[in-house]
Image (cartoon, rainbow, N blue to C red):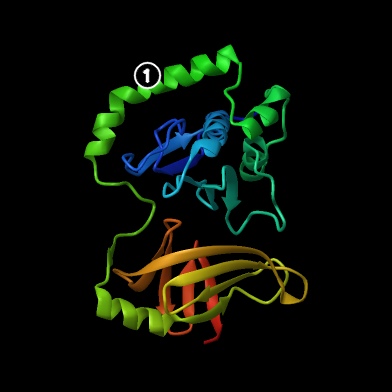
Amino acid sequence: MSDHPVYSLVLKQLAPDAARAGAEYAELRRGAVGARELRVLLAALARLAPTVEYPLRPEVRIADGERQFIVQVKEGRLHLAGWTVPAGFADSSADGIWRAITGEADDGATEPETAAAERRGAPRRRPVLVAVLAAAILAANGTTAWWLAQPPPTLLPAYRLLEEDPARRLLERMAGEYETGNAEGDRRLRIRRDGTLVWAKLGPAGADVEETALTAKAAETAAGGALLTDAGALIEVRDPLTVVYFGDVYRRTQR
């Protein structure tokens, strides 16, 4: 398995090792994360997932320079979102999500009991992994105070949230349906006036084969209007008919 440090992470409501969740954890950015380290972190998040209770909504945003993914905790399991996720992908295991992100084949490094332990939410009886996690926690403790003292890091351009009246006007102006195209594999974005959104991937005959519900707040960047989603991404307004989301250009098809 390769371990080139190619991933940048942003953790929300999570400890640096993803072994604990809480509203007290500020957003933390981790750079130069290799494939092995990412696999350990996702496994820790999978074990944590069954213990997470509303209103906590921990997640990890993962970028490799070209693609961006979001691993969310929903209903006690992991959920992978991102426009490059294969249609119909429904594997909630840490290893399955890791393979979808990295493209790595399973080298057998994970013991057969891993998947069962993740489903039960039980700790793995793996001394080596426990030692690695313990070392990671000890190393993180020395820098946690420094991280918490910094402004929340972000992969986004600078923005500010709009006040009520300009926010309402922006949402009314942006409300509608947008698409990257009309072929299978293209994406559709529905923006509603109340700030709720639906992102979908298109299947045969333009049908939605995967949907993700989001909420957003009106914002402004140096380039103009934008929507900040609860997934931590910006939908930027390029012109009255065009928005940009995760680097993809969506054109308005209807209001």
**Viewer-closest of 180 and 136:** 136
Q: Residue at x 37, y 19 (%)?
A: 138
Seen at 61% across and 67% down, the residue is: 200
Residue 63, position as x, y percentages in the image:
50, 47
What amino acid is at disc 1?
Answer: Leu
The image quadrant of residue 120 is: top right
| Above or below: residue 107 compared with residue 88 | above
Residue farthest along the right direction in this orientation: 204
Relative horizontal placement of residue 24, taking residue 203 as reference (left or right): left
Residue at the left extreme? 149
Residue 81 in the image: x percent, y percent? Answer: 58, 54
Q: Would you name the residue on which mark 1 appears?
A: 138
Q: In the image, 11: left or right of 46?
A: left
Asked if residue 255 is positioned above or below residue 54 in the image, the reply reads below
- In the picture, the quarter occupied by the N terminus is top right
- Where is residue 143 shown, x and y percent of the image? 29, 27
Q: Secondary structure at mark 1?
A: helix
Q: Residue at coordinates 50% horizontally, 34% vertically from top-left?
A: 5
Displayed quadrant of residue 240: bottom left
Query: Left or right: where does residue 137 sit relative to residue 143?
Result: right
From the top left corner, tell me how far across and down residue 90 is, in percent. 69, 50
Give the mark count. 1
Residue depicted at x 48% and y 34%: 33
Residue 24, placed above or below residue 203: above
| Callout 1 crowding tier (Cα within 10 Å): few <14, some 14–19, many ≥20 | few
The quadrant in which residue 195 appears is bottom left
